[in-house]
Amino acid sequence: MVVPGTAPRLSKMKICNMIDAMRAASRDCRGAGKRLGLVPTMGALHEGHLSLVRAAKAQCDVVAASLFVNPLQFGPGEDLAKYPRDFERDCALLETEEVDFLFAPGVEEMYPAGAVTYVTVEGLSNKLCGRSRPGHFRGVTTVVSKLFNIVEPDLAFFGQKDAAQLAIIHHMVRDLNISVQIVARPIVREPGGLAMSSRNAYLDPQQKKSALALYHSLLEVQKRFARGEQRPEPLIEAGRQVFAEEPAVTLDYLEIVDPDTLDPVDNLSRGALVAVAAFVGKARLIDNLVLDRS
Ligand code: AMP
């Protein structure tokens, strides 16, 4: 049914599996003077991803999403093979959001035999998750720069959920003079506060409750900061204490860092980033919060 006063949506989402097809489609759009937005994802979509799509729809004339489980950002022994995949469901969700293009290349299309070039943001890539996952951010920056070269978006949308990734991508775009505006969007959470993640699919109901330790640790840090604690160490200790009381969760790191350099901060001020990563069963989960006095 067409609601009076609205135009029916004529075209369905176009799926591009090949780089040439995606590039031709995006060049057509931009040639027609349209503002193009890109939402990069690894699929297994949830409301966090869809919030990025909605932001892109609001700010752009044409929206492309990409779906590529990037082998380069997984280390040996990590969950590449098990990573949740449901292409049909993802397509249906993106179609409902009226995404115009879905770029869903195969691994050989993105990394043909003989590819030997990588993009590394030096220094930052070894911090936070980069310390626990060597090579992870090199994989991210290599694939994101390839996506930018292929799609040539005017704007690209990323979630604050991956705060270190955002900082690293900002540096990459600035250092390599890539002509794209990065738009950061807030973390979308489950009703209880757990940050949405494709990896939450690994959790059983009990583990989902235990996983709240990540969010609760951030809230604990925020609460003490709001009460006037200025020193990072007691705040970090208070956050760690939450994990001490949740044996089903193994803390990887809890740090308070500058959101741009990802270096630990000595003097706390509004805007410092509290970042946490922890293992719950097979799942490695991350979360973060920006400190605020109010
Ligand atoms: P992924 O599919 O996990 O690679 O994530 C694709 C994009 O979605 C990244 O920019 C993430 O930061 C973003 N994202 C993932 N989870 C959330 C969330 N809970 N809230 C907001 N953005 C998210």
Image (cartoon, rainbow, N blue to C red):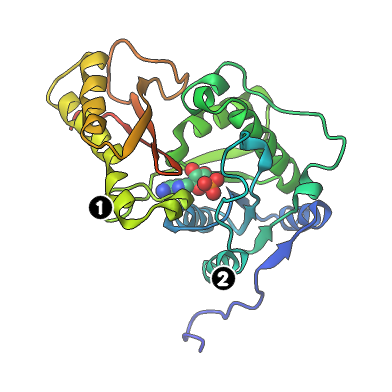
Residue under label 2, please give it: 92
Residue under label 1, please give it: 192
In percent of width and height, residue 272 lies at 33, 23
**Between marks 2 and 1, how big is the CA–CA gap?**
27 Å
Q: Quadrant of residue 171?
A: top right
In percent of width and height, residue 117 lies at 79, 29
- Which mark is nearer the camera, 2 or 1? 1
Disc 1 marks a residue whose amino acid type is Gly
Pointer 2 or 1: first along the chain: 2
Outermost residue on the left side: it is 227
Residue at 56%, 79% in the rendered image: 7
Q: Tell me the crowding category of disc 2: few under 14, some 14 to 19, or many 20 or more residues within 10 angstroms, Cα based.
A: few
* Position of 182 relative to 226 (above/below): below
In the image, the residue with mark 2 has its CB under 8 Å from the nearest atom of ligand 1:
no
Residue 158 appearing in the image: no
In percent of width and height, residue 111 lies at 79, 42
Residue at 39%, 44% in the rendered image: 186
Q: Secondary structure at mark 2?
A: helix
Q: Secondary structure at mark 1?
A: loop
Q: Quadrant of residue 141?
A: top right
- Please name whichever residue, 154 or 185, is drawn nearer the observer in this view of the structure: 185
Left or right, 142 with respect to 47, comes to: right
In percent of width and height, residue 200 lies at 42, 51
Residue at 65%, 50% in the rendered image: 68
- Please name whichever residue, 201 or 26, is drawn nearer the observer in this view of the structure: 201
